[in-house]
Image (tube, coloured by chain):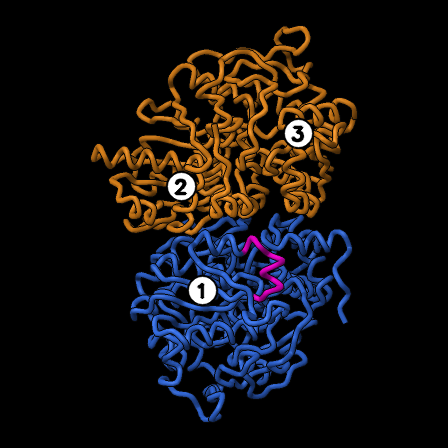
Chain colours: A orange, B blue
Amino acid sequence: MAAPEISDTRFTLSQADIPSAWFNVAPHLSSPLDPPLHPVTREPVGPDDLAPLFAAELIGQEMSADPWIDIPGEVLDVLRLWRPTPLIRARRLEAALGTTARIYYKDESVSPAGSHKPNSAVPQAYYNAREGIARLATETGAGQWGTALAFACAQFGLECAVYMVRKSFEQKPYRKVIMETWGGSVVPSPIDDPDNAGSLGAAISDAVRDAVGREDTHYALGSVLNHVLLHQTVIGLEAQQQLTQAGETRPDVVIAPCGGGSNLGGVALPFLPDPAVRLLAAEPASCPTLTRGSYEYDFGDTAGLTPMMNMYTLGHDFMPPGIHAGGLRYHGDSPIISKLVHEGRMEAVAHRQKAVFEANVLFARVEGKLPAPEAGHGIASAIAEANDATAKDEERVILVNYCGHGLLDLSAYEDHLAGTLPEEP
Amino acid sequence: MAAPEISDTRFTLSQADIPSAWFNVAPHLSSPLDPPLHPVTREPVGPDDLAPLFAAELIGQEMSADPWIDIPGEVLDVLRLWRPTPLIRARRLEAALGTTARIYYKDESVSPAGSHKPNSAVPQAYYNAREGIARLATETGAGQWGTALAFACAQFGLECAVYMVRKSFEQKPYRKVIMETWGGSVVPSPIDDPDNAGSLGAAISDAVRDAVGREDTHYALGSVLNHVLLHQTVIGLEAQQQLTQAGETRPDVVIAPCGGGSNLGGVALPFLPDPAVRLLAAEPASCPTLTRGSYEYDFGDTAGLTPMMNMYTLGHDFMPPGIHAGGLRYHGDSPIISKLVHEGRMEAVAHRQKAVFEANVLFARVEGKLPAPEAGHGIASAIAEANDATAKDEERVILVNYCGHGLLDLSAYEDHLAGTLPEEP
């Protein structure tokens, strides 16, 4: 690898630099996570309770205390269709802001599904296929996760059933087309109430019911759970190598949008052991789980079918407003992320939709890429950090996860440009 | 740069490897190109005739005989937002075909606009801005070129007026949203006949009229002309380095979709001096310029405002059917490409729309990316070449240009999956 020029903006790794193991944050936490509780008995759940839903290997990862977990070669074979992803110094954004900070973004939008989601979809499909499962059921809100799982299932010959929040199903017909191109089947949720616009919690209930009811089917979740965040740590592990390539000792702050926590966990957790690195969650003001929720046991879904987890929650019956960042409209949050916020190791801020789109349009004009509405939350936070650094005349190094592109969310841009985005409370 | 593993699938270059000069094919042609003729006098046009439309530097490039033309640093600063683009060995497609061939695709879909088009939009905007022009007018069919020019104009502070074929304008509202996000303005063409579905030739006429009528405005064309193909040669020049990285001496055949010729020229012309490399144009059966047109002088637009060029043409009043590969619906072709086909140095094949989408869906399932309808013509040809190699038990090395993604063309996939693509003659 040639030493990059000082003026370089894109830091790319060779395929040999893809991490060969995932970073497990468990041994680095201040204390073990509180156990998930059975939804009926409220007793801690064990591997047997989860076996109808998940592959044994994934259950093992969910509860593992090993510091590193090897990535199977078959998984790496698929990840290297797009990984390592580039780390990009946003020099033109820096110039537009006139900032003293250095802003780097990790571009996860280059995956087949256009987001970070395949990083976990691929291993989930792989482990299930290896254990003889023929079909996966899942939910999707904005469509990012369902798209990723349909892609991953196509790689390992699995069927894929996606329960899509009805409002998104109707608003975003092209998401369905992509999933079907990869061989997935897509049905609107809730399946038993065609007049209901649906929610992520309700779609989880539909998918879990499907998986429990069929011997050949398991369930797949795209965020929240420990093994999902584990799979996403390839993001932060690559970014560490790339920041070194860029001549940086460490980032001063690592930022990512946060809905269920998977892209935030993926980029931030490998930096947790370094106390000099601040970690920052960016969430929507209209679904302010970390900034305004309670830290307590709650269900992961609306119907109360999933184990209860100790996490920040707005209540499992909370119905967030229909903002465009559908991937962040979740009442709860990852137990790992929740614990870190609760203990003060991670910060959280909330952004209003209009401010997010102003950040997105600025980013698009100077950096050339149209961010997904979800990604804009991270960009808005990165801009705020850069402006704060400028005000204090600090050379702050900012790392933000660019979790997905907005090419399938253009109706949101249309609303923003037309000034018809709804005002939020 | 570490030596790639034999199992590598993606060949990436560092930013230092971006070509610093464009490859000019003119000195490598068997004889000079026939001159463009004035549309009224039918006399050869000189630089003065073109000055109302194009920046002087671009006119110089159009007529240059220099073998290499330096790329300005300000242009490289923008290109390196996404360049060098990856070269990818399509190992999973090879496995699906069971082929003896090796298939490489150059991924131009990673640009901000999602296609190869910004490679020329950026220098065109740059040279015009440097000469004091404040505004560019252009046409767009499917939307790829207008999108690219809006992005490029945003980088250099130019206004951008895009005349969009009315049928596309109505069918693809999201293309307009992207262009407007970058600050462009978009109007349906023909501007004087709201009941007319429009054509690329008519939109060129609208844009030329705009540019001629305003002192502060020049015209920009996204294909056909020599300087556009020149700018696109970064594609082939990078691919040469990457094939060496992959351990290949040369490609046996270089393939690209061909409408006006810019992506084909970009990937193929740097290989022209090597007689062992076959060059192949893939065009739509419904707009078969190279395979069924006449080689003669014709106008570039419908109204007869542009200079006449010696090229393959279906007649400047030819109205191609409304296929989804809107970027390939052009009656004429690049004079350079036309000359090479006429002299037998380049081959041409035509594909029907349904076969193109079958190739696209196979590609999407195994390689993970949804190609643009235009790109599918190259993929269909690459698959045919691979199958031919297999039948002859040859280790054929195939290089195909993946000129754009299909994320803004999903209605075409929807029609294909539903079996409602129209049959072609």
Residue at 50% over, 48% down: B5
From this view, report whether residue B384 is shown above or below residue B13.
Answer: below
State the image coordinates of residue A206 (x, y, percent, origin top left): 71, 26
Q: Indicate which disc, 2 or 3, sits on the residue closer to the N terminus.
A: 3
Q: Which mark is residue B161?
A: 1
The magenta segment is B165-175
Residue at 42% over, 55% down: B183
Marks 2, 1 in one chain = no
**The quarter of the displayed image where residue B70 is located:** bottom left
Read off the residue under disc 3: A198
Depth order, front residue of A276/B35: B35
Binning the other alpha carbons within 10 Å of mark 3 as few (below 14), some (14 to 19) or many (20 upward) gives: many
Q: Chain of mark 1?
A: B
State the image coordinates of residue B359 (x, y, percent, origin top left): 69, 58
Task: Give the SS element for disc 2.
Answer: helix
Residue A205 located left or right of residue B16:
right
